[in-house]
Amino acid sequence: MTTQERQRTLFVGIDVHKDTHTAVGVSPFGEKMFEITVGNYKKDFEILTKKVEEMQGIFSPYYGLEDCHGYGERLSEYLFDNGHNICAVPAVMVDRLRQNTTHPEKSDSLDAFGVAKVMMQNIDSLPAYTISQESEKAKQIKEISMDREYLVEERTRLKNQLHSLLHRIYNSEYKEKFKDPFVLKALRYWSKAKPKCDPFLYRSMKRKVKRLLDLRIEIADLETEMEILLEGNYTLQTMSGCGTVIAGMIVGEIGDISRFHSPGALAKYAGCSPRECSSGKKHRHMKTKSGNRRLNCAFHRIALSQISHSGNDKAKEYFKRKVSEGKSKSQALVCLRRQIVNIVWCMIKHRTEYRNA
């Protein structure tokens, strides 16, 4: 966006909720122009766009939503179908803006104003909202990926609870029976075991073991479904350190790759672009904590895998070179993460397989 276009843009930040959406219009000079709260139905969206159209002669509107695919999905689709410009604003960027104020406060109005302010500062790096065959498939993959994450979190909680129960029932002896008390063989053993203990503890153990066995099947089914959706259109699994789960996280968060005009734009959205922190004669770059955290986590896990003992020789060589140049291991990992963003962008954009050359 050029300076002239920016000066004619009305930044409309929208804080979305299940039943209502709060919108705040901000001029390119940071002045609050209007505030309105509407419902989550088409007639309410028409009220919002009419309010914005009142300033159509002065400014050209650009909408920003914290959540384009959750509670804000209906509104996003309505605005897109009616030819409006929309971008997705990561919630972490709004939160960081709020925390940097003198007296951090939170309300729907302030959150919507924060979305608009983030748009003003980062409009060139925020991805546009689009509806395409690729984005729809990515949306499905993201839903499956999120469902899997919730089930994995539930599995972790159950394992911790079962650890405590097994210790109360068997003392430390349960650790001698199996090296890992949660492998399939062990779970089947606990489901059939009849220890002499309080009946309440016994029933609690049975319930948790049964749920863990069910979770194994549910998680495996989701991974299979994700793998089927990734087949044919995406080749990320050909890169070392990127399996089905990580590939699903990346594709789900990126959506349509055309939203990112360059690897740099994707890196900034993912929070993998180091920020400058210079003063006087000192010039240095630091890692940023803003950006899409799920995407950032996926790139970080690939980088860690590639520099491991059985990882990628080219990545390990790059990492060692950065360390030899005087960078800390943490800084070298940030550099490698940035390289991985470049590779992923090219692989999805051009539908090519990974080449370790």
Image (cartoon, rainbow, N blue to C red):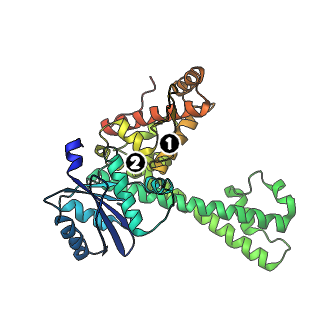
Q: Nearer the viewer, residue 192 or 73?
A: 73
Where's residue 207, x and y in %? 68, 73
Residue 207 to residue 338: above or below: below
Q: Nearer the viewer, residue 278 or 184?
A: 278
Q: Is residue 338 visible?
A: yes
- Amino acid, disc 1: Thr
Residue located farthest toward the left when viewing the structure as drawn = 57
Quadrant of the rendering where the C terminus is positioned: top left
Secondary structure under tag 2 reads: helix
Where's residue 196, x and y in %? 86, 73
Where's residue 99, x and y in %? 51, 56
Label 2 with label 1: CB-CB less than 8 Å: no
Can you tell which mark lies on residue 288? 1
Mark 2 to mark 1 CA distance (whole Å): 22 Å
Residue 140 to residue 241: above or below: below
* Residue shown at the point (59%, 66%) measured from the top left: 214
User: Disc 2 designates what residue?
Assistant: 251
